[in-house]
Image (spheres, rainbow, N blue to C red):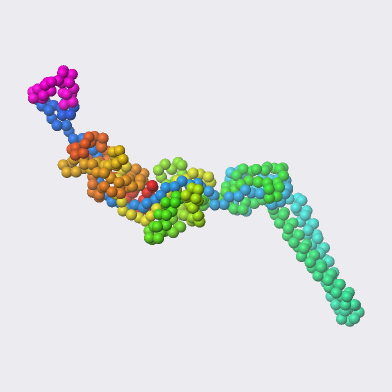
Amino acid sequence: MNRIRRVVGRGCSSTHRLGALCLLLALGGCNEKGEPVAAAAPVVEVMTVSVQAVREWDLFNGRISAIDAVDLRPRVSGYVDRVAFREGDEVEKGQTLFVIDPRPYREALASAQARLARARATVRLASEQDRRGQALVKQSALSREEGDIRNASLAQGVADVNAAVAEVATAQLNLDFTQVRAPFSGRVGRAMLTLGNLAQADQSVLTSIVSQDPMYVYFDADEQSLLRYTELLGKGQRPGVSNTVRVGLANDVGTFPLTGTVDFLDNQVDPATGTIRVRAVLPNPERRLTAGLFARVRLEGGSETRAVLIDDRAVQTDQDRKYVYVIGPQNQALRKDVTLGRQLDGLRVISAGLAAGDRVVLNGAQKIFYPGMAVEPRDIAAPPQQAAAAAPQTPLAK
């Protein structure tokens, strides 16, 4: 200590002497005899690196869309007689939603049926007259011209019957159309026309219906991804159109709980955006999906590979370089520059720079002031995210 006082005292003012002593005490401290001691090595938490099986996924933004959607319009004109549903409810295929006043169409059907009955009666009479006329012609009791007239009357009567049958079918169809039914099962919107309003055939929108299960998700894949997928497909490292997708909604922070399958790839790239439209089908039994919702889509990027994964908190930045601290001989913290790959829920793929068995500093890197500094490592278990990443088919986002 006397030696330290002499060193500090040479050529220094009292203020400098005090500052130097404080720094010396902060770095090393003194024992009970007043002798300086070495500073204790800082405690850091380390995690052992392992090579794990992962499956790469690409991240895109998309929109949920209904498979079937329709603006329901009437096929006959008339005044709305009844609204037979509750707005916003789910309806079944064939369920009656609106009733248009059926009385004019019921009367039109009765009139058509009467014309059909008259035509059939006329045909029966013409048939008897034709039968008798043909017999008389054979007996030369009736001219052949008169026989031809009777035969033509019968044919005309048959044609009238056929026309009357068609009129009855049309009238019956129009009467059926007074009950506007759901063309498919789905969720119905609000009633655009209510009781007493005039509905124009093929023009007035009565309500809208969208199907609920399953649902579509549309997203646009960029040109680079498309070319990479095509290359992987040629190498047999990727399935065809039927690729698995994972989907998360706006409230699914960091998770993708929904699973679907790609069923459609557009036939051309949009030159304005450099993307191609892709569609996937998602089951929706719990009705979580609603048409128009924003969705985050993870598309299977390639076959299963082996990769080094570490917690993203271990990665440090030095200008444009990324590095981590690993525990070397004599518990020294050694710097290793690394090349980063894709990220997944706090886990980072390390493309180069680390190997299986390296002990990476996870917590406490701020206590390491220079490479080679002695530390006291404490091993910790892999976090839940990393344990999950070891399982097959782990999704990796860009």
Frontmost residue, 159 versus 304: 304
Q: Is residue 176 above or below residue 325?
A: below
Who's the residue at 25% across and 50% down the image? 356
Q: How many marks?
A: 0
In-image side of 55 versus 145 (left or right): left
Who's the residue at 27% across and 38% down the image? 363
Q: Is residue 19 above or below residue 264?
A: above
Residue furthest out toward the left: 2
Q: Is residue 374 visible?
A: yes
In-image side of 370 versus 251 (left or right): left
Residue 343 shown in magenta = no
Frontmost residue, 23 versus 120: 23
Image: magenta residue range:
1-24
Frontmost residue, 244 versus 183: 244
Frontmost residue, 71 versus 223: 223
Choose top left, top right, bottom left or bottom right for residue 152.
bottom right
